[in-house]
Image: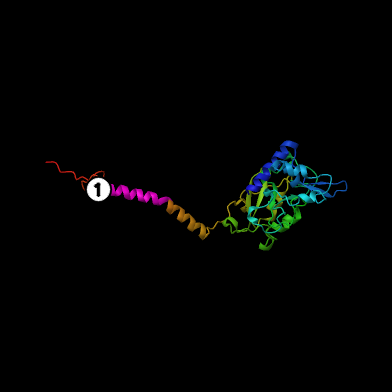
Amino acid sequence: MNHMRQLGLALFCYHEKWGAYPPAYVADENGKPMHSWRVLILPHIEQQALYKAYDFSEPWDGPNNRKLAGNIPPIYRCPSQHGRGNLTDTSYLAIVGPNTMWPGTAARKSEDVLDGEACTLLLVEAAESGIHWMEPQDLTVEEFLSTHASDSWTPQTDIHRSDHHYYYTCHWNALFGDCHSQPLIAPVPADVLSALVTVDGADLVPDDSEWRNLAPRRYWRWSRVVATAVFLLLCLLPLVRLARRRGGEGDQKSDGVDPKDGAVDKPSD
């Protein structure tokens, strides 16, 4: 989710500079997608050198750009992947469609989001997406709804099923137009998903819907429990020793023994 928040900040900075969010892709004169939004925001994720090396006069998989294929910025890969899948595939996809935040080659402005940016999806996480980070391809609305809607969702089609960071509840992470990210617990009702992907459908996302359950149930791993117990024990040992030492000194004083010189105080007449 931290990666998604950084991507949200990069998209916001792009909007501040150019007056609009980047298009989902840049197309050639025939309408064929050539360059992805992930390439367009490279200067805003501290990848200026990679951006300068990219040749916008040829497609993303052209002879020059193909040399950059392996230089995927770490921010485009979910840390929980741990080397799984193709290492140059992105973990974060836009939802492309006429009424979404990503209407193809058109650039969306923040004032276009009439439904409220806090309730409009920007990006979703896709484990092992199969999409190269430079490739101008993302999820269509139909693909997104068929994968995530409650009437079609199954564990096999869940886009992100993670056992990392002791999460055992099926969920997928999402970034919204106001740059906040959160996990959404699957399955999500189809009408809620439809409301979340549109920017001007005049549809309301119910405030009391279960999709706002931001905290999946967490389970402690026994290794973490043991490590935490050992850490607390090591922190408490010095306090126990100090308490015993002070207790011993108090016993000596109560017996009339000066702990400094061991002399016995004589009772007064």
Tell me how the rendering is colored. Answer: rainbow
Whether residue 220 appears in magenta in the rendering, the answer is no
Q: Residue furthest left?
A: 269
Image spot of residue 104 (x, y percent): 79, 47
Crowd tier of the residue under label 1, counting other residues whose Cα lies within 10 Å: few below 14, some 14–19, many 20 or above: some
Residue 113 shows in the view:
no
Looking at the magenta stretch, what is its main secondary structure? helix
Residue ID at (28%, 47%): 249
Image spot of residue 120 (x, y percent): 69, 46
Which of the 4 quarters of the picture holds residue 144?
Answer: bottom right
Residue wearing tag 1: 252
Q: Residue furthest front?
A: 261
Left or right? Give the position of 246 relative to 217: left
Residue extent of the magenta highlight: 235-252
Residue 8 shows in the view:
yes
Residue ID at (67%, 49%): 74
Left or right? Give the position of 246 relative to 111: left
Q: Tell me the quarter of the image containing the C terminus.
A: top left
Whether residue 238 appears in magenta in the rendering, the answer is yes
Residue ID at (63%, 52%): 183
14 or 268: nearer the viewer? 268
Q: As shown in the figure, which amino acid type bears the numbered disc 1?
A: Gln
218 or 146: nearer the viewer? 218
163 or 42: nearer the viewer? 42
Residue ID at (41%, 51%): 236
Which of the 4 quarters of the picture holds residue 87?
Answer: bottom right
